[in-house]
Amino acid sequence: MAASADPLANITTGYPKLAARIEIQPQLSIYRRFGALNAQNILYLQAQLIDLETKLRTQQSRDDTNPQGKKALYAKTWYRLENSASDGDTKQLDLVLKTRQVLSEFNPTWFLIRIATDHAIIQQSMILKLPDPNATDLHYLQNYLETDSMGPLALLGRDASTWGSMLERDAHAPDLVALKVRAEKDALSTWAAKKVVGRLFTCCFKRFVKPSPGHGLVGVEDTLVYRATYGFTSLVASMVPIASIVVLYYVDSMPARLATIAVFNLFISICLMGLAKAKRAEIFAISAAFAAVQVVFIGTDKSSSNSAR
């Protein structure tokens, strides 16, 4: 979304206003990954579990050979272990319960049949899959934090430099992740959304666009840009084959025709990369098919010329 008015004038400046802005534009949900701290937490949990495991195995061996009370049955029946207080010794039970508690943080508790995203390993796995923030969205957030509507510089804590600044774009934390990123589109759509639309909107179209009834922002949605570039791509896709045939029709020299085929094949490959985000295999296949059509035209045209003579 391009430039906007401030629909949040009644929201308290600082975290409340920033949070409200993120609600309206969820692509601004950019936070630190804290990868080192998450990894450290897992390492501590692992060390704690290893220590508990060693203590538990030692205590189990001691109780198994202890004739006092029912201690020898602790490893054979949960009932006896659960009621070990009657023997005046709950060391093994305490270790089991403590181990269970730490395991519930270290691993997902499948026996509760729930998605345990709050557990360390699953949490870290999910965080590592989060993508890096889009540069455009990060720059927008940097700009917004320094606008008059935000103070400027409304955040005064140590986290104020998390996203960098307008003067130091790259001074942001190195482990930023985005909870929602813009859709991965072709190079033309990305370039248009980043460079062209914002400038055109500011100088030409801003006065004609009304604020959104949903969130009060004034701007151009990315979907509108993508529809425009899709139409342009469709036009190019329909015109290139026709243009190549027309050019080949008016070229008489065989070397010149072969050069023309090479040029159009190069052009169609560039279009596939920049306009359609085609895969490598698709580029090879389409380029080969396109060249084959042109070769067939040359052969047919040559045969027709010979027959006419």
Image (tube, grey):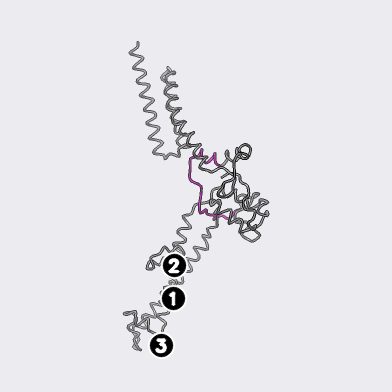
Whether residue 278 sits left or right of residue 33 in the image: it is: left
State the residue position of label 3.
Answer: 88
Secondary structure at numbered mark 1: helix
Give the residue drawn at x 52%, y 58%: 33
Residue 76 in which image quadrant:
bottom left
Can the viewer see residue 78 in this picture?
yes
| Label 3 – label 1 distance at C-alpha | 19 Å
Secondary structure at numbered mark 2: helix
Instruction: State yes or no: residue 306 in magenta.
Output: no
Mark 2 or mark 3, which is nearer the start of the sequence?
3
| Label 1 – label 2 distance at C-alpha | 12 Å
Q: Are marks 3 and 1 in contact (CB under 8 Å)?
A: no
Give the residue drawn at x 52%, y 43%: 222
Q: Quadrant of the N terminus?
A: top right
In this view, the residue in front, 212 or 156, is: 212
Q: Position of residue 120 (x, y in %)?
A: 46, 64
Q: Position of residue 164 (x, y in %)?
A: 61, 53
Rendered position, 115 above or below 195? below
Whether residue 150 sits left or right of residue 296 in the image: it is: right
Q: Amino acid at mark 2?
A: Phe
| Label 3 – label 2 distance at C-alpha | 31 Å
Q: Are marks 1 and 2 in contact (CB under 8 Å)?
A: no
State the residue position of label 2.
Answer: 106
Give the residue drawn at x 34%, y 88%: 67
Q: Amino acid at mark 3?
A: Gly
Give the residue drawn at x 55%, y 51%: 25
Can the viewer see residue 270 in this picture?
no
**Any mark on residue 98, and which?**
1
Q: Which residues are magenta?
A: 172-193
